[in-house]
Amino acid sequence: MKMIRFNYIAILLSMILVWGCEKNIEPELPEAPPLTFVDAWITNKNEPQIIRLNQTLPYFDNSEFPGISGADVRITDNENNEYVFIESEITEGEYTWTPPSDSETFGKVGNQYTLTISYDNTILEAASTMNRVPEIDSINFRFEEGNSFFPDSYFAQVYAVDPIGPGDTYWIKAYKNGVYLNKPSEINIAYDAAFSAGSVVDGITFIQPIRDGINPFEQDENDEFLSPYAPGDSVYVEIHSISNFAFYYLTQVTVQIDRPGGFAELFATPLSNVVTNIVDVTNNEPLIGFFNVAAVSSKADWLDPDNLPVE
């Protein structure tokens, strides 16, 4: 009994010592020079296409990135088509190309595109190809009885078949009731029909984890998981064709921003700038951001209260 009591007291003292040693540390980070940030994800959707040109700020500065004004921004393709992006009169650093009619869109599958940005005696360049994209066959809902992790829940799945021929890469975006699922954990990308180039999954339906990637995972005020969808909810899904480089870029973005936190952070990949396909051809200065030209397929559905799935 004495030994047990001694061990208890030792543990208690250790905890007190740990609590007593807590101290807030505010490290002084050296201020690095600002980097140019290019956000250029272009699609063939019939809507204005936007390229954002900004500069980064120091780590602890919570202000919005300042825009770079007065740049010449244009995209050309291998058929000598040119798309000139006009700077916004409202938002500094935002450049837009607008389709000339309701029936026209940006680009063509198979064409190669070059982005050129000129400002302050600096020229930036990047290249991308608009790759093919599969049509979405359907969006289905399923019901699963509750367990120790989830209540009774409705889950959505998107069905599409990867075209025959290895090397296709995609970004699957989902919207619940019109709201884009944009959490780091909700970045849903596929290499052919699975997660990586090493899988033999060419020319088949997307595997279940990819199909299930359109579900939000939300919690209530008690940190209890909610059903991803409820009767009456809508879901809208887009599949964007992306380059293999863009697939790698988004993989790295997920690693950098979807941090585990807590003790697990000790073993996480250190923070670092993500690779980019944009090059400063004038000064060879480092920069961040990405350029991709995507073909997009889409489909919408809703969880009909009068026709709910059963387990």
Image: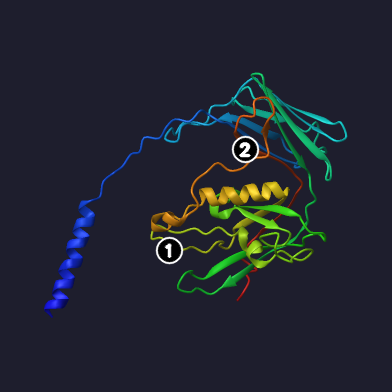
Cα gap from disc 2 to disc 1, whole angstroms: 36 Å
**Where residue 41 sits: x, y (%)?**
68, 40
Query: Badge 1: few (under 14), some or many (20 or more) residues near its Cα, within 10 Å?
Result: few
**Where residue 84 sits: x, y (%)?**
76, 27
Between circles 2 and 1, the one closer to the viewer is: 2
Farthest residue to the left: give it.
2
Residue 257 relative to residue 307: left or right: left
Residue 45 relative to residue 147: left or right: right
The answer to the question of whether label 2 and label 1 lie on touching residues, with beta carbons closer than 8 A, is no
State the residue at coordinates (56%, 51%).
254
Kind of residue at disc 1: Glu
Work out whether residue 284 can be spotted: yes
- Check the picture and name the quadrant holding the N terminus: bottom left
Between 68 and 29, the one nearer to me in the picture: 29
Above or below for 133 versus 89: below
Q: Secondary structure at mark 2?
A: strand
Farthest residue to the front: give it.
284
Residue 169 relative to residue 109: left or right: left
Above or below for 282 versus 248: above
State the residue at coordinates (17%, 67%).
10
Disc sitting over residue 186 in the figure: none
The residue where tag 1 is placed is: 224
**Where residue 211 sits: x, y (%)?**
66, 63
Farthest residue to the right: give it.
79
Disc sitting over residue 289 in the figure: 2
